[in-house]
Image (tube, rainbow, N blue to C red):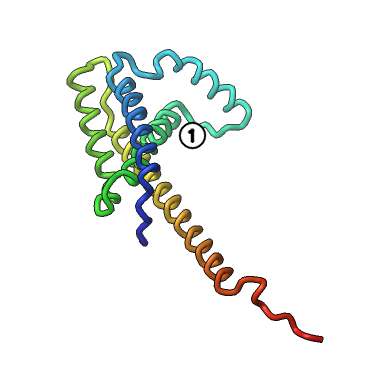
Amino acid sequence: MPTAPLPSRRYRIVTSVLCAAWSACVAVIVFRQAQVDSEAAGVLQRGLRFLHARGLPTSIDYAFVEFTANIVLFVPLGLFWFILAPRGWRWHGPLVAFALSVLIELAQHVLLPQRVASPYDVVANGSGALVGMLVAWGALWWREKGRRRQGHFRDAAVAHPPSSRRRPEG
C-alpha cells in the first residue's frame, strides 16, 4: 500500500484539538456509572420495532445497533492516529485501539461492576479504528494526488504560456 504524505502543521494542530475533545467524550462514556444507552434503550427498541414493521430486516436489532455504534465511536481514533503518528507508526492505529479497548473493558469490569465488559466491544472498537485509518490514508493520498496533478498543469502552463504559442498563418 503506498504511503500517504504527512499532513501540514496546521492540519496536525486542528487534529490534535479534535483528538483531545474526542478523548474527553470517550472518557465520559467509558467511566459513566450507567451504560450510555440506558435512558434511550426503550426509545431505541420501540424505534426498531416500528422500522421492523415497515420492512427493516430483523437482523438489524439492538445488538447490531450497539455494535455499529462502537465501530462509529472509534473511527475518529483511527483518523487521529494516522494523522498524528509518525510515518512508521501510522499503520498501528487498529492495534492501539484494540489495546486501548482491552484496557477500557478491564477498567469497566474492575471499577464499574454495573457495566458489562464485552469482547465484542473490543472487536468493534478495533474495527472502527481500522475504518478511520483507511479513511485518513485515502483522504491524504487523494489530496496529494490532486496537488501533484495541479502542479503538473501549472508547470505545463508556465512552460507553454498561451501568448508564446504560434498561431498557424493563413
Residue 34 spot, x, y in % from top left? 32, 14
Residue 148 spot, x, y in % from top left? 48, 62
Q: Residue furthest bottom?
A: 170
Q: Please tell me which residue is depicted at 54% across the width and 65% down the height of the picture.
A: 154
Q: Please tell me which residue is depicted at 32% across the width and 20% down the height of the picture.
A: 28
Left or right of residue 141, residue 167 in this image: right
Q: Secondary structure at mark 1?
A: loop
Q: Amino acid at mark 1?
A: Ser
Left or right of residue 112, residue 10 in this image: right
Q: How many marks?
A: 1
Q: Please tell me which residue is depicted at 32% across the width and 32% down the height of the picture.
A: 121
Q: Quadrant of residue 80?
A: top left
Closer-to-camera residue (60/130): 130
Residue 105 spot, x, y in % from top left? 24, 28
Look at mark 1 in the image and give the residue it sits on.
59
Quadrant into which the C terminus falls: bottom right
Residue 128 spot, x, y in % from top left? 37, 39
Closer-to-camera residue (40/32): 32
Q: Please tell me which residue is depicted at 66% across the width and 77% down the height of the picture.
A: 165
